[in-house]
Amino acid sequence: MEPIKVQADGVDLDVGVISEPFMADWDNDGVTDLLVGQFSPGKVSFYRNAGTNQVPDFTFTYYLLADGADIAVSAG
């Protein structure tokens, strides 16, 4: 499979050198969203899919939270 560029908010998504994407219907609206864990700054970004599963339209929504604070894992 050839790599494709993914956009969020109309701009090519740049998640750094080391990242881990995960697709899931995170907000339970029937459409697959994008979650990306990043090595630096160690946060997990949630990109809501405002499009369809066939033609996604991702928009940065928020970093995942725990107890009201961004989830962050240090590299050290």
Image: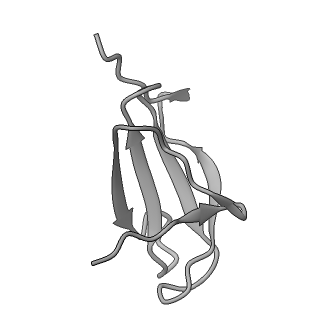
Q: Can you say whether 46 is above or below 24 in the image?
A: above
Percent x, y of residue 2:
33, 75
Where residue 74 sits, quadrant-wise, is top left
Q: 10 or 57, which lies in front? A: 10
* Residue sitting at the far top: 76
The residue shown at (45%, 32%) is 43
Specify the quadrant that holds the N terminus: bottom left
Specify the quadrant that holds the C terminus: top left
Q: Can you say whether 75 is above or below 9 in the image?
A: above
Percent x, y of residue 52:
55, 86
The residue shown at (36%, 54%) is 21
Percent x, y of residue 32:
44, 74
The residue shown at (64%, 52%) is 61
Q: Can you say whether 37 is above or below 56 in the image?
A: above
Where residue 23 sits, quadrant-wise, is bottom left
Where residue 62 sits, quadrant-wise, is top right
* Residue sitting at the far right: 10
The residue shown at (37%, 67%) is 24
